[in-house]
Image: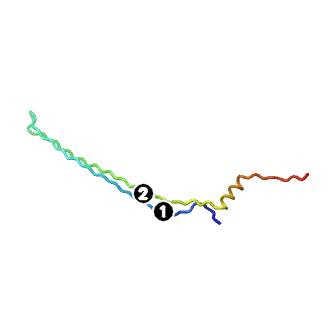
Amino acid sequence: MMLNNLVSINKSIEKDKAGDVSSDIGASFGLGFLKLFKGDAKVGIEAKGSLSNKVIETLEVKTTKSIILSEVFDKSSNINASSG
């Protein structure tokens, strides 16, 4: 007797990793009026990443006589025979 009408056929797990790294380096130099030398420097690093897991399961739905009969019993009404 089948108790459940879902049958698992296939199950797979997909893993995905993604990443991105960027960097900036900048410098500026100049000659000021009262200052002889003026300079600036900056450095920036940015890193991003993501990780994802996906589970895919293939199911097959079976329709059997016991399932159909169970639905008929649930939807039917009782008939009482009265003697008279």
Decide if residue 57 is on the left or right side of residue 38: right
Instruction: List x then y, in percent, for residue 72.
Output: 70, 55
Instruction: List x then y, in percent, for residue 78.
Output: 78, 53
Q: How many marks?
A: 2
Instruction: List x then y, in percent, for residue 74.
Output: 70, 54
Residue type, label 1: Lys
Q: Do the residues labelled 1 and 2 touch (CB within 8 Å)?
A: no
Q: Name the image quarter holding residue 42.
A: top left
- Relative to 79, say whether 27 is above or below: above
Residue at 10%, 35% in the rendered image: 32
Instruction: Label 2, secondary structure: give it.
Output: strand
Residue at 63%, 63% in the rendered image: 3
- Dot 2, how many residues are within 10 Å of its Cα: few (below 14), some (14-19), or many (20+)? few
Mark linked to residue 53? 2
The residue nearer to you, when weighing 79 against 11, is 79
- Dot 1, how many residues are within 10 Å of its Cα: few (below 14), some (14-19), or many (20+)? few
